[in-house]
Image (cartoon, helix red, strand yellow):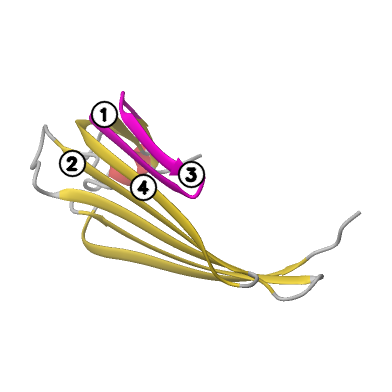
């Protein structure tokens, strides 16, 4: 089971210069956070209050995507998602940024590096980060 699961829905405007540069602005966005009830037995978790299993928010969302080629066989992908909850403290903007670097070493090997940082003061009063390094073995049929 997903815990937490985040769902966002709202009308917006998409500006797309090309496939590797997009910005979506949605000024009336609903956001629902769903967690398993075991996470909220002893207190709030992921912004969901104690004893509950979901939280509803209404606000504005801005989502950006930018991908570029750093050099031959190396691409960099940036994804930034911002959300402001009108129903709570609107000036506290939730941020989710992901950086993906993909490198093709040769015909058979590739590697990637992923870095993600999240700031959501309802879930945790600080930045949460994760880093992943992967090595891939490629074979074409």
Left or right, 110 with respect to 5, comes to right
Give the mark nearer the N terminus: 3 vs 4: 3
Drawn side of residue 77 relative to residue 41, left or right: right
**Which residue, given by chain and number where applicable, does mark 4 sit on?**
64
- Judge whether 9 appears above or below 66 on screen: above
How many numbered discs sit on the rendered protein? Answer: 4
Q: Is residue 56 in sight in this rendering?
A: no
Give residue 135's quadrant in the image: bottom right
Mark with earlier residue (4, 2): 4
Q: Earlier in the sequence, mark 3 or mark 1?
A: 3
| Residue 118 position by quadrant | bottom left
Whether residue 25 is visible to the viewer of this picture, yes or no, is yes
Instruction: Name the outermost residue toward the top.
Output: 11
* C-alpha span from label 4 to label 1: 16 Å
| Region of the chain picked out in magenta, as a range | 9-30
Real-space Cα separation, disc 3 to disc 2, in angstroms: 27 Å
Tag nearer the camera, 4 or 2: 4
* Circle 1 residue: 29
Residue 80 lies left or right of residue 134; in this view the side is left
Mark 2 lies on residue: 84
Q: Give the farthest residue toward the bottom.
A: 105
Look at the picture and state if 133 lies above or below 11: below
**Spatial CA span between label 3 and label 4:** 12 Å
Residue 83 location in percent, x, y? 24, 42
Along the viewing direction, whichever of 64 and 54 lies nearer the viewer: 64
Q: Nearer the viewer, mark 3 or mark 4?
A: 3
Q: Secondary structure at mark 3?
A: strand
For disc 3, the marked residue is: 18
Mark closer to the chain start, 4 or 1:
1
């Amino acid at each position: 089971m997903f815990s937490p699961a985040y769902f966002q829905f709202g009308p917006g405007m998409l500006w797309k210069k090309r496939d590797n540069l997009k910005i979506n602005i949605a000024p009336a966005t609903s956001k629902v956070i769903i967690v398993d009830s075991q996470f909220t037995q002893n207190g709030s978790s992921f912004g969901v209050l104690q004893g509950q299993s979901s939280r509803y928010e209404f606000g504005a969302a801005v989502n950006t995507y930018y991908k570029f080629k750093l050099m031959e066989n190396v691409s960099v992908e940036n994804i930034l998602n911002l959300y402001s909850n009108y129903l709570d403290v609107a000036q506290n903007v939730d941020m989710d940024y992901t950086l993906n670097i993909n490198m093709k070493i040769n015909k058979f090997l590739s590697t990637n590096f992923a870095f993600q940082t999240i700031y959501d003061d309802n879930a945790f009063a600080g930045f949460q980060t994760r880093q992943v390094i992967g090595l891939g073995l490629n074979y074409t049929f």
